[in-house]
Amino acid sequence: MKTKEELKKYFENGDIPVQEEFWEWQDSYWHKNDLIPLHQIQNSGQIIQQNSSFKDYMNPTLEVGALAISGSIGFPTGSTIRGRTDSFLDIIYANQIELLGDMLLQTIFYYSDTNVFISKQDINAKTFTPAIPVTAKKWKVSLHHIDKTQTVTQPELNAIKINCYSSKSVTFNDIVENAKASIKVISEYNSLEINLGENIPTEIGRIAVNNGFNSTSDTGIRTALIPVISGKYLISQKSGYKISRVVFYKDGIFANQNVTTNDFSVDNLTSNQVRIVFEKNTPTDIVTEQDRLDFIYILKNISTSKYDQLLNESKKSKPLPSTIYTINEQVAILNTNDTDINFDLANRKIIISGGAIIDTGNTTVGRISLPISTAGIDMPSAITAGVVLYNKTNNTIIVQSQTSAPLLNHLILFTYRYSGAFTTFYVTGLKNYSVNGVPVSQKDARQMNKFAVDNFGIKYWNAPVYPAFNPLTLTSDVLYPMYDRVIAPFSNNVTKTVIGQTEGPTPYDILRIDISLNRKTPPTQRRRKPRIFVCAGTHGGEKLSVYTTYLFFKLLLENPNKDEIIDALRTNYDWTLIPLVNPYALNVGNVNGTESVRWNHNGVDINRNFDYRWTEYADGGAGSQSYKGTAPFSEKESQLVRDTFNAIKTDTVLFIDCHNFGSGVNIDYRAVWFASSFNTVQNAIYSLCDRLDAEIRKRYSYLADKDLLAFSDIDGSSPMSQAWMGNQQVVAMTIETDQSDYYNPTDPTSFNNNVITRSIETYVNTFYSMGKYAVDFYNNRMY
């Protein structure tokens, strides 16, 4: 059989293989999984040379001496380490096996060709002959160092060293052919045990941790700082001890903490040291040297790699991802009526009357009545994003910032957030409540108990790199001809209509564009398509959203790369677009080349002028940035959106209102933010956020360590367009992308190519994911 390298030569430099070569290649392909006798493997003696570096195929953080961070407090002298490695070899050597190096082959596990376990053979010799079952096609070997452990002997270093596996090999000796081949141990660290013994420094008494809000203390003892690398850990502690928690540090500075019994995870991006806090069943008994900590870390699943028998080389592997630990505090389920909890925004108080019940989900604890607070619980002005916690120990309620370290022994009741100067107030986690005494009942709260999965499946649209954009030039006189040029070739599928004009002495046209890309068949033979309604420029000064909406519809119509996701959006939906709801705000002027203004000629925020909770909404009055106007639909711009929706609502399944937020380091959602007014939509949006967050981190490394890249709120109190339409059983939402690239170390400017690319990628994937959800929602909704 030809090797891959030999077969590859047939096709180099545009060569066309002759017929004999083609059949030889085909024969090799169909027999690629056949087992090969050792003496027939090409260049078998060179295998070890093909992996010259330990770091080539193992996690780079596990090279010699890397387990203890240089300059930090290390492991105590006398600590020991014992590591085991496993390796799958999809080939069996039926003859004698000889081991070289300071490792001992402990066990061979035999498997069928479908990886079904058959039997195992325990080995305790340097040379042996495998007892291979007749049905065995593969084996797995488990190896230990021959001396089992290594010991820390250098007090000045206090590091646990891992012997470099690059110099170790297993030699398979084929007696019949009298040929030896050194096969590199390319493996997975299945476990790495670190026994810290009795000598690790500990302290008796209390530990206080500054967690950004207040201090918490435990009585017991704590260990000194112990250096750790990324991975998952298990603690096997001495009997009589109770682990209280693990406290994480980054270079000696507190990072996080974890209530635990015997396991935790570490990611070196956020922490490289831990302190174990534990107590004895009778803390007063902790008085002697013998009572100091004795436990074992087990580090699992660091890296893995496979052996490719055709190429005769070991494939390089990537470290398995370890998870950043998030405290697993219990989230309470609150059963409330509209009047049980009232948010007094003028005085920044949470008023709790009788009736609110906490469902703990714990059969022992049962249900808890929320303590009454008629005087109100403070929502500090410094906290714009708060989490409301119930103290299980003393039956009190407190508020802390969502960015503060978690508190022990607390239940999370709900969260709230103010949206900056626009006075929008969001609450997540409450079904029913009041704002300024007016009941807010979030529709269909039971939907939040339903499961939501990723609507993408395996599909996700990765945008090509788009060029940067100069917002100074964008006005309605520039934008509308851009649409005309895109629409022109599609006159049979696209209609453009002037549906009205703006308020004010200098009226500007407001356009409606309808798109239906049907086959050339009579209307009676066309399927009924769901419709997606899109608005942009409701806040005309938000130029990124206006421009990205144009880019999206240009892509939708032209689909230059014949992309299947774009094609699905073209063929499965009809589209209605108002590309610029508020031309006045776009045209009236520029502020630093980014935003014009938010409101229309009358000073009204069009996105607070819709007839959904308009009366209850507190806007700050005329002159405020979120002025709601004199009455619902008092403005021509909101009237035109209303009338357009009423004309198409029988087949509209999804409405998206497109916005962007501004530049600056203090924004708390960074890449994309969504809002909806009803729980019916929120789970699907959370699923969308999960996927967007993961994909953005992969593509933009300078955003990988940010807390939240994709973010969503439930807005149950604002008279927005999406709330008004959502109240009519249409999946409706707001999308906002970020015009700034503040965190980009090479180009932190607004509207650069990363900003434009990220924005259009977010739009396409949002329409794709939410469109599928909206159709299902439409087909199952109650009329």
Image: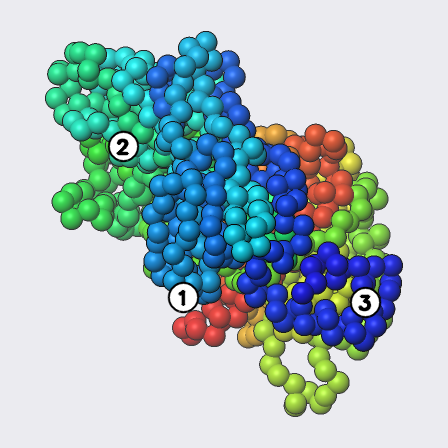
Kind of element beneath mark 1: loop
Q: Position of residue 66 (x, y in %)?
A: 51, 24
Outermost residue, top side:
156
200 vs 580, left or right, is: left
- In the displayed structure, 269 sits above or below 40; it is above
Instruction: Write the residue at 84% across / 44% down.
Output: 473
Task: Tell me the tag on residue 346.
Answer: none
Instruction: Write the residue at 41% across / 67% down.
Output: 135
Q: Position of residue 690 (x, y in %)?
A: 51, 50
> Total marks drawn?
3
Of tags 3 and 1, the one toward the viewer is 1
168 vs 325, left or right, is: right
Of tags 2 and 3, the one toward the viewer is 2
Give amino acid for label 3.
Ile
Does label 1 or label 2 sit earlier along the sequence? 1
Residue underneath mark 3:
487
Residue underneath mark 1:
134
The answer for how far apart the CA atoms under marks 1 and 2 are is 40 Å
Of tags 1 and 2, the one toward the viewer is 1
Residue underneath mark 2:
236
